[in-house]
Amino acid sequence: MLRWKDVIKLGTSGNPKPDLRVEKTAEEWRELLPPEQFHITREAGTERRNSSPMCRLFEPGQYACVCCGTLLFDSGEKFNSGTGWPSFTQPIKEDAIAYHIDSSYGMTRVEVTCNVCDAHLGHVFQDGPEPSGLRYCINALSLNKIHAAEGGKAEASAATETPKQPAESKATFGGGCFWCTEAIFQQLKGVKKVESGYSGGDAHDPTYHEVCSGETGHAEVIEVTYDPTQITFEDLLRVHMSTHNPTSLNKQGADTGTQYRSIIFYRDAKEKAVAERTVVEYRERLGKRIFTEIKPFEQFYRAESSHQNYYRRNEGTGYCESVIEPKLARFREKFAHLLPAKSAAGM
């Protein structure tokens, strides 16, 4: 168990050598990370106090570096410090974290970084609970929560058992007005339900008008419930990236604001890897910078009933005819192979 004297010794005399190293240039990290995560992890930024629900989540699981995927902390060492940032008493392994004496603000603090890729995580203090007395004060944006089902016993059993495909899965995307994205994803085979809502911000259960103000941090998103035996997460990602403009920052057509940003939420490490690979693919295909954020899923807030199933309830209105129907036509032509057999045959 690490204690404060060990932290100071490591920060002064040298950190342990990690099992591996991940090194990229600043521009390479910038291409892989959303702007907020790049600022926190690669520019030693600090997120706003109480800006993430992760402070209040204590269910079993582990926390990995958002940059390189190295496991850093276990939920068993997580505690409610009341500071407004996720707090831990110990790293998952002594060589997972690197320590750096920080005197940049006229005081002595100990900065903690990922020992594999040098991502800035936060700081460690000596005011934590016993027996270690340590408080690792960590930016939530530097962490990727890996649920218990993805590691530990579940991971070990996967080596001897054939994994069962779940009967249904969920995916959450944002790419402009959710009236349009909902209408598109409702057309796909294997999709059981599409709901419009809000995610990615700070406010609890916001209203449409609050989200439109741009002050909640939420994006307009859809939550797709689908059968992974009929359509894959990667298929859904390709539809998402092809049916909005991911090269436009906080803008889709006439809709402008952070609530219309391009965003992908992942629920596990596998989905994160697929999302990152797909974004790189579209960047190379389009030859432009992609502004699509890739963030861990935390909470989906269902929008008001008036926003649900909007296109099907309002076909024939001006907005649906001039905006949604042309998008649907282009989508059906490009993704005919992902439409139900009856729909594809009727095109």
Image (cartoon, grey):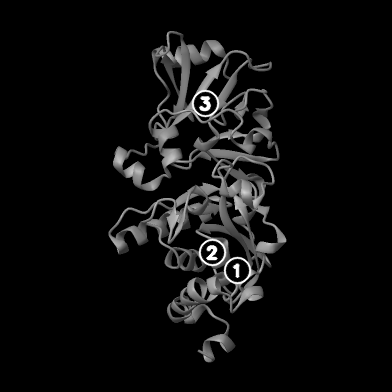
| Marks 3,1: beta carbons within 8 A | no
Above-or-below relation of 93 to 195: above
Name the residue nearer the viewer: 28 or 97: 28
Does any portion of residue 137 appear in the rendered image?
A: yes
Above-or-below relation of 36 to 294: above
At 58% from the left and 82% from the top, the residue drawn is 340
Q: How far is mark 3 from mark 1, CA to CA?
A: 38 Å
Q: Point out the tag, 3 or 1, that comes first from the N-terminus.
A: 3
Hey, what amino acid is under mark 1? Answer: Pro
Pointer 3 local density, CA inside 10 Å: few below 14, some 14–19, many at least 20: some
Numbered tag placed on residue 228 in the rendering: 1
Above-or-below relation of 226 to 153: below
At 54% from the left and 74% from the top, the residue drawn is 318
Hey, what amino acid is under mark 2? Answer: Phe
Q: How many marks?
A: 3
- Indicate the quadrant where residue 63 lies: top right
State the residue position of label 2.
Answer: 233
Label 2 secondary element:
helix
Pointer 1 local density, CA inside 10 Å: few below 14, some 14–19, many at least 20: some
Q: Which of marks 3 and 1 is in front?
A: 1
Q: Point out the tag, 2 or 1, that comes first from the N-terminus.
A: 1
Q: Where is residue 193 in the image (x, y as percent from the top left)?
A: 67, 68
State the residue position of label 3.
Answer: 94
Does any portion of residue 116 appear in the rendered image?
A: no
Q: Quadrant of the N terminus?
A: top right
Q: Position of residue 230 (x, y in %)?
A: 59, 75
| Marks 2,1: beta carbons within 8 A | yes
Q: Where is residue 35 in the image (x, y as percent from the top left)?
A: 41, 41
